[in-house]
Amino acid sequence: MKNIFIGLLFFAGIYSFAQEAGKAGELLRNEASVSEMRSAKSKGFDNRNNNSNNSGFRNQNNQNDRGRNPNYQWNKNYGYAEVFLRIPEMGYFTVELGDQMISNGSGKYRFFDLQSGRVPISIYDNGFLLYRTTLQLRNNNRLVLDFFTDNGLYLLDSYPVKSDSYGFNDWNDVWNNPYGNQSGNWNNSGNVMDNNTFSQFFSIFKNEPFDDSKIAMINQQMRNSQFTAEQIRDLVKSISFDKNKLMLAKSMYKKCVDKNRYFLVSDAFDYESSKRELREFIAK
């Protein structure tokens, strides 16, 4: 009886931490009509159940109609907007966004070089239209979305895309935090702290009287935020004792979005031995 009770508690714990569809994000209205959803799209869908890409689907039935000398577009500047979409369900889905389309069974769809403005997005399951809506895209910004067949398309967030950094350590990072997942293969990280938010945070942080209270404040913020190397340098530099600086610099390394610039943090230390120990830590 005791083993049964423990087993029930175990499964209850798993269920309570499971991702709940629609728990986070803004629901985008489905604009696909009933008649569209009942009929499969005639071109480009062959009801496959594998992970191969559906490249060239638009012209697969019209290859003989192409001219002998097609007009190529070299280095055309399409746009600077991006869209990352995840479909965590099992299946072979196709996502059409503007003039781009991706088909696979991995559940991860990344669109680059998109024009800014209103762009239609359609989602198909084995050729059948499931969902259609319109996204508002902006240059140098990335929309991050989740789609659930029974709940709809959710806009989780919008991130600025910098020329020197994507803003995350891993593409999967952006989906973990909104759902509160703390385990599994998804890395635990949150939003990159922008300069304005950091300035507000830093003004409060530097008024804390002791190292312990400052470090506690940072540890709490790291649950939901990531930082740039420059921001980490300023935080570490505000700590009084080098041993505390070193401990903080090591703990914040995993939350740095531009690890290639972590050498900037060395400037926060007073002693060369601390700088050397941080370098050795990073090298490992």
Image (cartoon, rainbow, N blue to C red):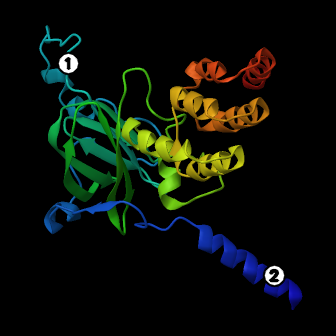
Q: Residue under circle 1?
A: 77
Disc 1 to disc 2, C-alpha distance? 60 Å
Q: Quadrant of the N terminus?
A: bottom right
Q: Residues within 10 Å of mark 2 (few under 14, many from 20)?
A: few
Tell me the kind of residue under disc 1.
Asn
Q: Quadrant of residue 7?
A: bottom right
Question: How far from the left and from the top, in percent, is residue 76?
Answer: 19, 16
Image spot of residue 138 (x, y percent): 21, 37
Q: Is residue 45 visible?
A: no
- Viewer-nearest residue: 201 or 11: 201
Residue at the (77%, 25%) spot, across then down? 281
Q: Amino acid at mark 2?
A: Ile
- Name the residue that disc number 2 marks: 6
Q: Position of residue 86 (x, y in %)?
A: 42, 49
Of callouts 1 and 2, which one flags the residue occurring earlier in the amino acid sequence? 2
Residue 237 horizontal side relative to residue 78, left or right: right
Q: On the rendered image, what quadrant is the C terminus found in?
A: top right
Other residues around mark 1 within 10 Å, as few (<14) / some (14–19) / many (≥20) = few
Residue 272 location (% of width, % of height): 77, 15
